[in-house]
Amino acid sequence: MIAEPVAGQASPPIVDAHNDLLMELNFRRAAPTPFADYWMNNLHSGGVKLQVCPIYTAQLELMPERGLRQGLEQVMACKRAVRENAERVTLVKTRSDLELVESSDRLGLMLSMEGAEPLGYDPEMADIFWELGVRMFSLTHNRRNAFADGAAEPAHGGLSNLGKQLVDRLAARGAMIDLVHTSERTFHDILERSADAPVLVSHAACRSIIDTPRNLSDDQLRAVAQRGGVLGLMLLPLVIDPEQPTVSRAIDHLDHAVEIMGIEHVGLGGDFIRQVFRAMIVHSQPDSLLPPGMRMDAAIDNIAGPEDYPTFVDALRRRGYTGDRLDAVLGGNFLRLFRAVLPA
């Protein structure tokens, strides 16, 4: 039976596991208050309670020094956002930080790393980023780096020796390992090597619906669930359906993930790339920053940024997600994972 949304019905808080807003904040760093001016209201109006903010420098994989510099600049952009909005925003590094966000009107920001390019060729650099507040690490973006092969590599290689050292170091720290953007071999190598370390996939969809290396096979979805992880549903046409980039099609992916993984292992990871890169369009060759085949204006219809999450929530309710099921998908599953694995 299809559930009808109730007018004015409040939504559970949203946890978004991936939004590249730090790139835009760093780009706008000359502005007086970039986070308050360009992101705060969008996140608030969309109902986002906790936003994971990735450090992304994969376009600089051949220039490790620049990758490190931009990675640190993005960390500072996040810390500036917290400092300039100290009464409203908390950087979530510990369970007590998370408890403060959950028990108040505060917005939580959590640092992650999308691709280990800022580490150069040194796994020990992960310790520095951990101390700076990064709690979630993925080893690759789409291409190969010093640590592993990414999803777009035709050779489908796995972890390098440096990658094995990095996985060991992250597991010892208790860091969350994000399996996003990996080749299939890298994906399974990490699972095998990381023992009981916490794992997740911050932003992807289902390969059985749209066959792209950026999506996960049913076997991969099951493997994430068996390790207690959560999949964040990515809301971009590239993975949802380039020919039918609709909200309904996105929920088809969510339905399938729930069927394969269980309702307790599915969440949101919007990856609203259009809003981020809009700020960079004045630069030369902006499309060089985008994954192959992705346009600057790519977006699911009516879901261009976090401010549009209410539209997605209404569509979820019409598809039958209500009560505890809706709460789990919107934020409860990621909150449960974060409570369990963040340091005290």
Image (tube, rainbow, N blue to C red):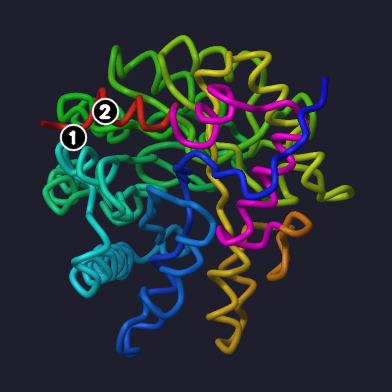
Camera-side residue of 150 and 172: 172
Q: In which quarter of the image is the C terminus?
A: top left
* Quarter in which the N terminus is drawn: top right
**Disc 2 residue type (three-letter):** Arg
- Dividing the picture into quadrants, the one containing residue 268 is top right
Q: Looking at numbered disc 1 in the image, what kind of residue is underneath it?
A: Arg
Neighbor class of circle 1 (other Cα within 10 Å; few <14, some 14-19, many 20+) is some
Residue 286 — which label?
A: none
Is residue 320 in the magenta section? yes
137 or 139, nearer to the observer: 137
Depth check: 163 or 109 in front?
Answer: 109
| Residue of label 1 | 95
Please tell me whether mark 1 sits on a helix, a strand or a loop: helix
- In magenta, the rendered stretch is 303-332
| Residue at point 67%, 27% (across, down) | 321
Was residue 240 drawn as part of the magenta stretch in this picture? no
Q: Is residue 295 left or right of residue 110?
A: right
As drawn, the residue found furthest toward the right would be 243
Whole-percent x and y of residue 93?
Answer: 19, 44
Q: Is residue 74 left or right of residue 191?
A: left
Mark 1 and mark 2: Cα distance apart in space: 6 Å
Residue pointed to by mark 2 = 339
Q: Which residue is at a point 47% across and 61% down the rendered structure image? A: 43
